[in-house]
Image: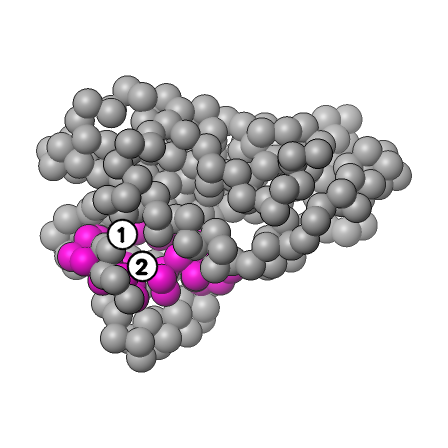
Amino acid sequence: MSQNLLNKVAIITGAGSGIGKEISLLYALEGCKVIASDIHYGNLKILETEVIAAGGDIAILESDISNEADITKLIQFCLDTYGKINILVNNAGIMDNFESIAEVSNDTWEKVFKTNLDGPFKTIRGVIKEFIKQQSGNIINISSIGGLHGGRAGVAYTASKHALVGLSNNTGYLYAKQGIQCNCIAPGAVETNIGSTIDQSKITELVKDRILSGMVLNPRTGKPNEIAQIALFLASDKSTFINGSVIVADGGWTAY
């Protein structure tokens, strides 16, 4: 490996599987010290073993991105462990059963927003003070093509990911002169376990007609490592002129 992230320190949420795990592994191989966070401790232990076996540096912490106390603990854990924070990757996210506005409950709406938007908002707010002190820092938010278009998910997921794009745009613009970058990656369909958060019994005929019918236009499903490669580029010194931007990675699905 070329060690593009040598001596950098990164917090990665949702690191126990899928895209977050691949980002964690790749960052560690590139010389980054990784703080890996996830709600599934068993998955973190597996990741830890793999990173250490590959010669990487990692510390793990079970935490729930929808819980503000856990976020505060996570940031302090990073500072206590490595003394600094250079990169934040907000990857943790959940789906919404593809429910339309007529069907979605308050509980589902609030649960999705707490994880997909409130969590990234509070982690960014927590690290931005450190980044301002350093006059440098890099934030990478994993949004979705569902955050750019209206027919890829239910109303809660779609709205939360649109808002995450806006949060990234605003943060990247406002703090650009302090040497801080904030960008989004908007993946299409990727082979992760996010589908396990979907209750298939709640998928209605409306969803099948208006949303799932569009799946036939998808050229292919992506691999988590393909998204991780973009996250590596955005975290490296090769992306210094990219800020407040969204990189779409969907194999051409939204080009139709």
* Residue at x 47%, y 29% (from the top left corner): 165
Q: Position of residue 244 (x, y in %)?
A: 37, 27
**Residue at image mark 1:** 10
Q: Position of residue 129 (x, y in %)?
A: 19, 32
Q: Position of residue 223 (x, y in %)?
A: 55, 59
Where on the picture, by quarter, is residue 130? top left
* Residue at x 70%, y 49% (from the top left corner): 219
Q: Which label was assigned to residue 27?
A: 2
The amino acid at mark 1 is Ala
In the shown orientation, is residue 16 left or right of residue 86?
Answer: right
Res. 204 in view: no
245 in relation to 5, above or below:
above
Q: Position of residue 188 (x, y in %)?
A: 60, 44
60 in relation to 168, above or below:
below
Label 2: element kind: helix
User: Is the C-beta separation of discs 1 and 2 under 8 Å?
Assistant: yes
Front position among marks 1 and 2? 2
Q: Nearer the viewer, residue 146 or 48?
A: 146
The magenta stretch is 6-34
- Crowding near the residue tagged with mark 2, few <14, some 14–19, many ≥20 C-alpha atoms within 10 Å: many
